[in-house]
Each structure stands twice: as structure tokens, then as C-alpha cells.
Amino acid sequence: MGEKVVSDGFDLSARHRYRHKLTECLEVFRSLLDEGRFERPRNLMGLEIELNLADDDGMPRMMNAEVLRRIGSRDFQTELGQFNLEVNIVPHRLAGRVLDQLAEELRTGLGYADRQAQEEGAGIVMIGILPTLTEDDLVSSNLTAVDRYTLLNDQIMASRGEEVVLDIEGVERLTRRSASIAPEAACTSVQLHLQVTPERFADVWNASQAVSAVQIAMGANSPFLFGRELWRESRIPLFLQATDTRPAELRAQGVRPRTWFGERWIGSAYDLFEENLRYFPALLPICEDEDPHSVLRGGGMPGLHELVLHNGTVYRWNRPVYAVSDGVPHLRVENRVLPAGPTVSDVLANTALYYGLVRSLADEPRPVWSRLPFAAASANFDAACRYGIEAELTWPRSGRPGGLVTMPAVRLVQEELLPLAAAGLEAWGVERGDRERCLGIIEERCRRRVNGASWQAAGYHRAVDSGLDREKALAAVTRRYCELAREGEPVHTWPLGV
């Protein structure tokens, strides 16, 4: 490819200092937990959406700097690739007509951004992986010119000591090599945040892990990469492989990847931060001047910068977040499972399903994670990524003590999980009309067995059957996807064919 794998720019002493600082931060974090110093949550939720830029032919446009200048809003930020943007929605209280309010804000904000992008010859596309991306698009020269992205690329490649190897076998098989982490930029997601108390954190995280497979089965939207049809949510294995810091020998030894589902249910937020320190070497060993013990003794609240930085380089699908706001620390669960799109209605349906299920499952006196082996939850996640809405998932047997049952995801959702999600949203105080409208979209996806990934795949095969070659078929699907997404109706209502 003509690109070189870079060398590590941090010396051993810098890494030792950072490791020592990380240990100090973890000790202080545990003290804060033990002393109950965290903010009582106000049922706050947050939402971030990663976006693609594409022209009228559905081809990626490497121009996020130009588009951001034209948008002129701090709600929109850069992402890893020059064809990426991210929009951040201010936190909302999870109650009342919150879903309707979010829909209005997103449609207004994204509509404005799309109009500004159109002035630059691009458009906003919400999709897990843009089907028209090629290997030539995903190279280091197309990374956004921001220091943290350059440093992240340099450190991951230095840790590997060899090129990134992509090897994904699904409907078809893809094998590629890359001299940078640029393929990661193909992955665009929705990130859902929920502020929780330390006492509540483990229940919410465990519930989030348990429902991750359901989220993917219902919301998969990434069936293509580099012209190949792979998994229904190909974003998951692509992200894992593009961010993998392990050379081949460490992978063979079973060393954990930095993109990680996990391996056990937890009892505290501390478990996750401690695992991060124990299992993962520093990727960006940058130390701040803050002495966390001194700050705490002086009555202040430490930012624990090194802990936060290290945590941000371990890519759990459900990530713990520590942050300080107005001098008070708080904890969040960041759910990073979902792909972007296809429409605002679809995003909010996925959002409602997640927050509703997590509330109900975390409230259960005999929680699902006491009845579902973690290995089964992990296998569910893999199956949902591979097969999407056609996946079969294992779940505790309803109404009977003990035992597991494996059933189609659509049946599990229709018969058991949609009522739980509705009850959870009601417990949050979300108005009935809001929850019925959003969960009704999930119910219709189940009834018709259609989500973003299945729609894309069906459209592609129809295009190929009509005589188009692979490249033209993917371009046609992408153009039609963009047209229908702008109309705003949820994906299960979209006509098939291109």
C-alpha cells in the first residue's frame, strides 16, 4: 500500500510513570466509591450519532472540515475519517415526551447539517458502514487531521508492529491488510449514555450486556464492507480487528483484544476499571500534573485524567464512564452497540428499546444475569452480529425456574421483551404515546423481519439479479437508501428494490 508501520514515540520511563499514575487514580476512584461521593443521578440520558458524508452518487466525500465550518455548531464534531462527523445531543431527562423532543431536535439539527453539507457537494448519511467505501478511501491520508487521531493511529500500529489484518467470513469472505487504523473509520455508531449511582451501576451494566444481542438483532445496519456481503452487523468484527493492538503471537496466546465484550458479569463499576488496568497496557501514556490524592485531601474532586484516558482506549461495547461536572463526580454506562441510522425514527425506536429493557431488567428481583451464563450472552452477541434479525438467541425460560431456551430473536422480542421494554419506559415516566410509537416500530420490524441490514441486502440482490455488477449494485442501493432515509419513514416501511 505504500504506507509504513510507525514506531512507538513513548519511552519506557514515560510508560512506568503513567502506569504508576493509573494505579493511583484507581485507588482514588475506589475511595470515592467507598465514601459515596458521587452525584445522585437525575435520570439523565445522552445520545451521540456518528455520520457519513456522501455525494449524490452515494460515494464518500473526504471533506468534514469544510462541512463543519459551514455548519458552525459545536454540536457537530470531527470523527476519525474525513468522511465522518459526529453529532452530540445535550443530556435529557428520561421522562415525559423525551423521545418526541429528541426526534424534533435530531430532525432539525440533522436537516440543517444536511443542507449545509449539500452546499459543499455532500450529504449526511446515517448508516453503520457506507456500502460504497473502498480500500482506497480507508488509508491514513484520509484520517482527520487532528493530533489525537494521528497519535492513536501511531500507537496502535506501533503496538502491533505489523499491518492490520482484516479477515471476516460471513455470507462472503473478506481478507485485507492495512498499514493504518483507517478501516475503523468505516464504523459509524449510535452511543447511548445513562447516568447511574455506584450502587446501581453493576445492575445497569449487566442488563446492558444481556440485551446487546437484542439491540443488534433488531437494529443491524452494516451488511457490506469493501464490496463484500459479510455479517449483518459487520461493523462489530471490523472495529475489533481495526483496533487490535495484539500481534499474531499474542492473539494465539489468548491475550484479550481492546475491543471487548467482556468475560463475566460484574458486581461494581470498580471491576471494569480494575480489569482495564490489569489486562491492557497503556496506549496513550500521557500524564497530567494533577496529584489525585492531594486534590482529594484538599477537599477537591480529582479528574482522574489518566484513568479516563486509559478507559477511553479500551473499547468495551458497554463502557463505564467517570466524569466530573461542576465539581461533582458521576458514573455513566455508555452503550456503544448500535449502528447509526437508518432514520431518526429508527434511531429513537432502538433508543426506546434499550432504555426500557435496561430499566426493567435492572429492577428484576431475580435478574436475568443470575440465570443466563455470561458465555451464552457472548454467544448471543456473536449470533446477532452474524445473522441480524434472523438470529436465534438463548434466554432464560419464561415463567419456569431454571433452564434456558433458544428461539428466534423476533419471537423473543415480540413475546417477552417488548412488554418488558414498555414497562421499563413507564417506570422512567416516559409518556404512553412516546413509548408506544417507538416500540411499535420494533414490533413491526419483527413482524415483517426487516431492519436496515436486511433491507440493504435484499436491495443489493435484486440489483444484481437485474443485471448490475457488484459495484453498481452497491452504489444503487446506497443512493436509494439515502433517498428513503431523507423521507424519514422507518426502514420497515421502505419499498424493496432499487
Image (cartoon, grey):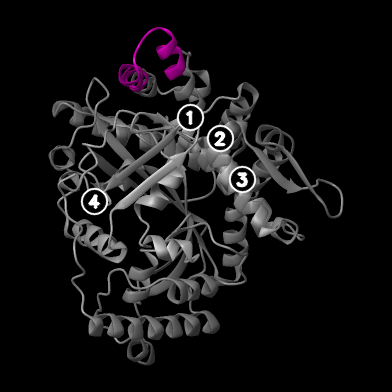
Q: Residue at x 35, y 55 (%)?
A: 243
Q: CA distance from mark 3 to mark 1?
A: 26 Å
> Callout 3: helix, strand or loop?
helix
| Image coords of residue 206 (percent x, y) | 61, 60
Give me the C-alpha separation between circle 2 and circle 1.
7 Å
- Residues packed near mark 1 inside 10 Å, few (<14), some (14 to 19) or many (20 plus): many
The answer to whether residue 205 of the structure is visible from this angle is yes
* Residue type for callout 3: Leu
Task: Using the image as rendered, state which of residue 178 and residue 423 is in the foreground.
Answer: 178
Question: Sequence-wise, which precedes: disc 2 or disc 4?
Answer: 4
Magenta range:
459-479
Kindly indicate whether the residue at mark 1 contacts the one at mark 2 (C-beta within 8 angstroms).
Answer: yes
- CA gap between label 2 and label 4 equals 30 Å
Label 4, secondary structure: give it. loop
Q: Which quadrant of the figure contains the C terminus? A: top left
Instruction: Rate crowding at label 2 as few (under 14), some (14 to 19) or many (20 or more) other CA atoms within 10 Å.
Output: many
Q: Label 3 belongs to which residue?
A: 425
Which secondary structure type mostly characterizes the magenta part of the structure?
helix
